[in-house]
């Protein structure tokens, strides 16, 4: 069982691993997609999604938290101005990972990680004449007979049973 196992160690010490993830995150924000090994991509996904969440908050605390990971003002502004706006209506899952197969030299599983494309807002075109008629048409007025209360039906007398001879 993996109780209390929070992350992959990636064969590195804590500062080395943190520096690796910081550099990968900076490259991902700069280029939008990067190619790396599958375990690194899976760890990077946690950092990259967290960065976008902080950027979506848009407050100074989120900017300071993101500044810990991105040591570049240009990347910070790109994160807060472009990526946060792109994912404003999305509630998580900002990245996707494509498996690319094995690396030739050592057989390591490779992956491509990228930010999802933004939702494209569809332009509303002018309604067609048929749709326009539906919009402008008023519901037909009900007749007095349709609006009058219905009379109660009387109970029918039971049908006579047929006797067998």
Image (tube, rainbow, N blue to C red):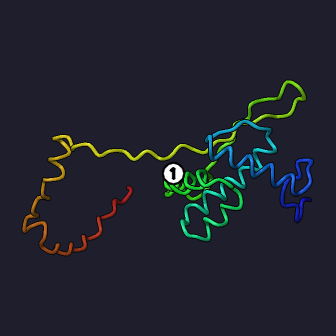
- Residue farthest to the top? 104
Give the side of residue 28 with respect to residue 162, left or right. Answer: right
Up-down: is 40 above or below 52? above
Residue drawn at point x = 71 percent, y = 57 percent: 69
Give the side of residue 133 with respect to residue 59, left or right. Answer: left
Q: Secondary structure at mark 1?
A: helix
Where is mark 1, residue-wise? 82
Q: Position of residue 49 (x, y in %)?
A: 65, 55
Residue drawn at point x = 18 percent, y = 49 percent: 134
In the picture, which quadrant includes the N terminus? bottom right
Nearest the viewer among 159 and 142 is: 142
Residue drawn at point x = 88 percent, y = 65 percent: 4
Nearest the viewer among 63 and 118 is: 63
Up-down: is 107 above or below 142? above
Which image quadrant is residue 148 in? Answer: bottom left
Residue drawn at point x = 80 percent, y = 38 percent: 37
In the picture, which quadrant includes the C terminus? bottom left
Q: Position of residue 112 (x, y in %)?
A: 70, 37
Up-down: is 46 above or below 127? below
Q: Position of residue 55 (x, y in %)?
A: 58, 61
Which image quadrant is residue 73 in? Answer: bottom right
Question: How many tags in the picture?
Answer: 1
Q: Position of residue 121 (x, y in %)?
A: 40, 47
Could you classify mark 1 by the number of other residues whose Cα lies within 10 Å: few (under 14), some (14-19), or many (20 or more)?
few
């Amino acid at each position: 069982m993996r109780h209390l196992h929070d992350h992959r160690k990636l064969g590195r010490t804590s500062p080395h691993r943190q520096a690796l993830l910081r550099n990968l995150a900076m490259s991902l924000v700069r280029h939008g997609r990067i190619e790396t090994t599958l375990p690194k991509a899976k760890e990077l996904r946690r950092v990259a999604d967290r960065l976008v969440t902080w950027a979506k908050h848009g407050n100074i605390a989120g900017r300071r938290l993101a500044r810990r990971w991105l040591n570049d003002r240009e990347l910070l502004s790109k994160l807060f101005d472009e990526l946060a706006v792109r994912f404003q209506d999305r509630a998580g899952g900002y990245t996707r990972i494509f498996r690319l197969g094995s690396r030739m030299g050592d057989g390591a599983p490779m992956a491509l990680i990228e930010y999802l494309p933004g939702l494209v807002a569809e332009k509303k075109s002018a309604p067609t004449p048929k749709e326009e008629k539906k919009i402008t048409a008023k519901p037909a007025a009900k007749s007095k007979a349709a609006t009058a209360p219905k009379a109660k039906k009387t109970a029918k007398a039971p049908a006579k049973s047929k006797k067998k001879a």
